[in-house]
Amino acid sequence: MFKIEVLKLVSINNEEFIYEFNSGINYFQGKNDTGKTIFYNFLDYMFGSSNEIGKESCLDNLDFAELKFFYRDRSFTLKRTMHSNLNYIKYSEKNWGKEISLNEYKEKLNLIFMLDENKLKVLRDFTEEDLTYRTFTLFNFLGEKSLGNIQDFFDKCSDFRYSMKLTTILNFLFNENLEKIFLLESEIKKLKDELSNLEELTYTYKLNERNINSNLRKLDAKISYNGKNADEVLEYLIELKNLDETKKTKKSRTIAELESIYHSLSEQVRVYENRIKDTRQFQIENENKLMLIEKLNSLISNQKEYDYLITPIQNILKDINTNISFNKYYIKDGTIKKLKEEKNKLKEEIKTNDSRFSAYSLDKKSFIIALIEENLDKNIIDKTKDIENKKNKIKELRENLLLLKNKDNKDKIDALSNFITSLYLSAKDESEVVSRDESLNVSIKYNKKGNILQPTIIYEKDEVIESENYYIGSNARHTLIQLCGYLGFIRLLISEKSYPIIPFLVLDHISKPFDIENGKAIGEIFKTFYKNLPKDMMQIIMFDDKSAESLSINPDKYESLVTGNKSGFNPFFYANSIKN
């Protein structure tokens, strides 16, 4: 059983006002600008929405609110402040405890609406994320802005925080392979644990191999350990242990000598690079001179009065060409390349053989040999191939898991489609649109991909039952279909008792797309719905400007938002306006 019983509003002047609720349909009527949508959002706020509703100007003088509801034989009261992040929850008639954060507030509510922890764990394993009652509120609210949507038809799907999670919920809800999926996930988890152990062993192996080779270099060994030549390394160590004194490493140059040569080569490279830079500059200048002299030579070569200049100019040209040729040769000189190659060789030799130039005593060398033997005795095996095999197996199982997760239970989807269709067609006597659809043999098919409610015409052709999509329809017609979709899902989720869902549906101005004649279809649909689900199992809360009678609704609780004492949802807003 679920029922919101009371919503108490308290002003900053400590004034109080109470809204009462009953099981079944609660109808709050008010014209435009009377706070219907504020009331609609306020219920979401009281159940943990993070929207800063306190910033609404019409709620400025509201201090806090308390909402009391009854669920599963227990009474709970929620309290939220409007202008600070103070939240409270208490059970039955107990005293208020300390204030809690919004996250704690939502965690406590999640425990209240979580019916079966084990089933929720199965859902968490399937979706690979924590889904709470807040995620499932996308099934609870149908607002005015989304009326008439039959594709991705839940109102909160316009919010990325909800739409990104809907697909995984639907995959779980309509999956027929949950047992196979559970077994696959268990196998994958086991393989992951084994993979983790193998990776740890491989890390240890690599570390062990690195330690052995590091110590072998200290011994100036001409052998290295590769994981497969332990016997060969041991033979080498036996030879060393049989020696009476430490072998003298044959080396023609010490580290100091190598470093001196390295620095000398670095200086030579620097000098050569500077010379090449200067040479390139000289070459550019000579080429520019050559161009100018050649231009001058072409200008005076055919004029006799300048004969005396020709010979000197030709000599200059010859000298410039000679310089240019020499510069090109110098630039192409391979000396600097050879110097750099030698420099890199020395650098590598210094880097890789540093430890070999340290002098070790016989005792020190014996200690190093003992360390190598100890590491060899560990007999740690490289598991790289096993790791690769495990990873490939996990990848294969994950691909199979994905296929299973996306495989639908057709019978379950058909059952939902049939229920939605039955709700829709139940309004045939109150709506000409629905009546016409019944005559055309229209049914509503739910398509999980895209979360679509698709009107379909079913007909017989050549003794074969066929169907085709039916796209013609008004916004009112689509809104009826959308409402039936909401009711169909809520009934399914409540009946399976596996999901942390609040058992209520909140509607804002659903009559908007309807004319006087077709609006009564809404009431007929509710009547049919409550024949399939008792009123104490799900509460409907409606905010509308039209009368309940015009929608053929006989509400279990009716209240006008505008009375002689108040002008809308917040009763203190009107009083405050009069004072001003």
Image (tube, helix red, strand yellow):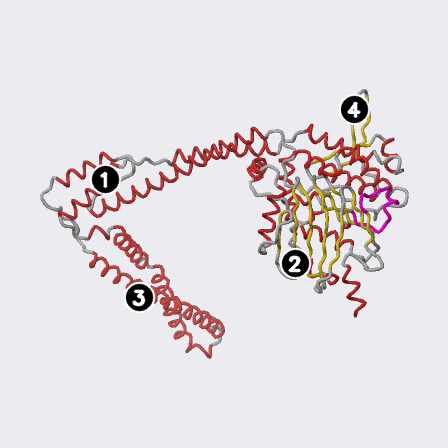
Name the disc covering residue 271, or none. 3
- Pick whichever of labels 2 and 4 is earlier in the sequence: 2
Q: Is residue 1 left or right of residue 220?
A: right
**Residue type, mark 4 in image:** Ile
For disc 2, the marked residue is 81
Q: Nearer the viewer, mark 4 or mark 1?
A: 1
Which one is nearer the viewer's eye here, 532 or 166? Answer: 532
Q: Which residues are magenta?
A: 542-557
Residue 191: name its quadrant.
top left
Question: Would you name the residue on which mark 1 appears?
Answer: 374
Evaluate if marks 4 and 3 touch, with contact meaning CB atoms under 8 Å apart.
no
User: What crowding class fits label 4: few (fewer than 14 Cα within 10 Å), some (14-19), or many (20 or more)?
Assistant: few
Is the Cβ of the residue at disc 4 closer than 8 Å to that at disc 1? no
Residue toward you, 505 or 536: 536
Residue of label 4:
465
Give the camera-side residue of 28 and 383. 28
The kind of secondary structure element at disc 4 is strand
Q: Mark 2 or mark 1: which is in front? A: 2
For numbered disc 1, what is the local secondary structure? Answer: helix
Quadrant housing the N terminus: top right
Mark 2 falls on what kind of element?
strand
Amino acid type assigned to the residue bearing label 2 in the image: Thr
Query: For the point 66% across and 62% down, which residue is it?
Result: 83
